[in-house]
């Protein structure tokens, strides 16, 4: 098979070929069932609550296939799908994506696999008709023909891969100047000349749906050539992680200020209103205004964050480097950085949660995302590992253990319906932000590119904490 424009040929493994063969057999079975009795086939699918799925001609074949249908030439104009065939297409797409390191998502690759199947079946049909081998099924796999078709379509898809820049509207409270947060992430001002008249009108409506008007864009540059959906989803994840990181550092260093930056968090109503009274004829009204996000008084917190981030291996530098590493490690899966990303997502949601009980649940989940390794003794593992993360701090071990136990017990009471505690004996955001900061720094030193279920890391987290006289509080 000749090389197309010197581009690398698509790799198809033996197990993948087996799945393709199975897929063709399944499609052939569905084809025969439909040809035998279309009404009964459709009725049977409908009785199971299943759609009458089909694979139709891809855009570059619609005209030629329609012409064949009009002239009553031999062709298979529609290929009927089953649940099994759809599952096989997904499996094949995932295998092709992984084995060829394609920077795309499965939903983008599935139509290409289906288009290749469609083209292959009709090309194979012509081959069989020309060779008079009419007893052989057009759905039996000819590897050379199929790989040629798939390779051409994959190469066409890859030519649309590109480096991209995304800018997400955010509110940066009390920030005056643009900031370069990392190599590929920055905060740039929202200025009127960036949008045309129509887009400005849309932005006005966009701002009307938010608590605060947008004043900055968080710019994420994806330096790897990838599909649009791949780069869009990655950049959106990076945006969320960076907002989470900024607010985590702020919460850790000054927990009374919850948010330096906000994007699309679910906001509570600005106004609270309800009626009350001793009876329905004597009702009074309670009304108030509540702003869910605490705003800093000046730009000093931003200044501190910027200066700290300039210092290698400072607290801010460790934390704000996470979103940058998400970009650099995006081609790999099941890494430790995924734990950190999930933890940041839950924490970002938790600090903006007004309901204390739901906040506790989300906070515990954010910590568990870091320290839970599918353990049987979940409670004790949670407590033990939080204490371990604090082992480098000059802090009473018993105090940390007591807080961790109280937090997890409160969460269990909320989930399992026991008596609820209205408040904890310590500041929840202060304690949890410290847990996350210490965990992220520890994991970063260990290596965020390491496997997320590392036995070595788990062993370290479960190793005993030596209580010195100072840490034991004696």
Image (spheres, helix red, strand yellow):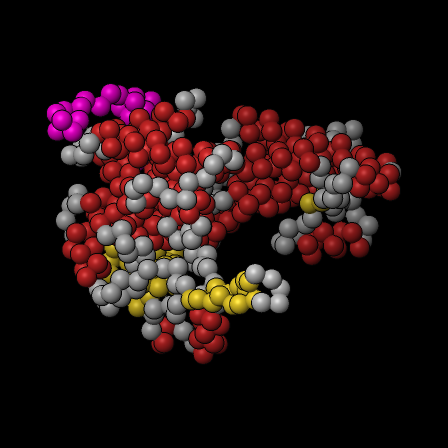
Q: Is residue 182 above or below residue 428?
A: below
In the image, residue 391 lies at what x, y percent? 21, 30
Q: Residue at x 19, y 51 (%)?
A: 309
Q: Is residue 202 left or right of residue 254?
A: right
Can residue 184 be spotted in the picture? no
Q: Is residue 425 above or below residue 20?
A: below
Residue span colored magenta: 447-474
Q: Residue at x 51, y 49 (%)?
A: 156
Q: Is residue 130 above or below residue 219?
A: above
Q: How many marks?
A: 0
Quadrant showing the C terminus? top left
The residue lying toward the viewer, choosing from 214 and 46, is: 214
Q: Magenta: predominant secondary structure element?
A: loop
Q: Is residue 427 magenta?
A: no
Q: Residue at x 23, y 44 (%)?
A: 318
Can residue 402 be spotted in the picture? yes
In the image, residue 321 lies at what x, y percent? 26, 46
In the image, residue 121 lies at what x, y percent? 68, 39
């Amino acid at each position: 098979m000749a090389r197309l424009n010197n581009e690398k040929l698509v790799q198809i493994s033996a197990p993948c070929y087996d799945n393709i063969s199975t897929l063709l057999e399944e499609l052939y079975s569905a084809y025969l069932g439909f040809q035998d009795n279309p009404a009964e086939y459709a009725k049977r699918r409908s009785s199971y609550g299943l759609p009458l799925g089909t694979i139709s001609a891809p855009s570059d074949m619609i005209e030629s296939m329609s012409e064949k249908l009009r002239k009553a030439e031999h062709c298979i104009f529609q290929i009927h799908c089953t649940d099994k065939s759809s599952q096989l297409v997904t499996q094949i797409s995932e295998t092709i994506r992984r084995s060829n390191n394609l920077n795309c998502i499965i939903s983008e690759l599935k139509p290409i696999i289906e288009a290749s199947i469609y083209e292959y079946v009709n090309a194979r049909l012509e081959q069989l008709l020309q060779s008079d081998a009419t007893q052989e099924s057009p759905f039996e796999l000819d590897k050379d023909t199929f790989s040629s078709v798939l390779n051409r379509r994959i190469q066409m898809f890859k030519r649309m891969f590109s480096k991209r820049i995304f800018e997400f509207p955010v509110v940066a409270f009390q920030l005056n100047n643009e900031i370069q947060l990392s190599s590929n992430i920055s905060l740039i001002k929202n200025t009127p000349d960036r949008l045309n008249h129509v887009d400005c009108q849309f932005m006005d409506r966009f701002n009307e749906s938010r608590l605060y008007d947008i004043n900055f864009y968080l710019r994420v540059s994806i330096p790897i050539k990838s599909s649009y959906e791949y780069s869009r989803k990655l950049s959106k994840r990076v945006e969320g992680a960076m907002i989470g990181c900024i607010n985590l550092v702020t919460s850790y260093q000054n927990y009374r200020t919850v948010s330096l930056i906000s994007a699309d968090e679910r906001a509570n109503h600005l106004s609270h209103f309800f009626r009350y009274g001793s009876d329905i004829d004597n009702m009074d009204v309670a009304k108030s205004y509540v702003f869910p996000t605490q705003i800093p008084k000046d730009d000093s917190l931003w200044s501190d964050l910027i200066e700290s981030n300039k210092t290698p291996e400072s607290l801010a530098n460790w934390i704000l480097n996470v979103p940058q590493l998400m970009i650099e490690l995006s081609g790999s899966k099941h890494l430790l950085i995924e734990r950190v990303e999930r933890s940041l997502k839950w924490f970002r949601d938790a600090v903006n949660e007004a309901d204390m009980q739901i906040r506790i649940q989300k906070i515990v989940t954010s910590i568990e995302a870091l320290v839970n390794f599918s353990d049987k003794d979940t409670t004790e593992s949670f407590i033990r590992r939080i204490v371990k993360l604090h082992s480098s701090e000059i802090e009473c071990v018993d105090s940390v253990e007591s807080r961790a136990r109280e937090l997890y017990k409160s969460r269990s009471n909320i989930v399992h319906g026991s008596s609820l505690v209205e408040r904890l004996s310590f500041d929840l955001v202060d304690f949890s932000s410290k847990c996350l900061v210490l965990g992220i720094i520890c994991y970063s030193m260990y290596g965020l590119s390491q496997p997320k279920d590392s036995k070595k890391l788990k062993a370290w987290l479960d190793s005993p904490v030596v209580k010195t006289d100072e840490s034991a509080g004696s």
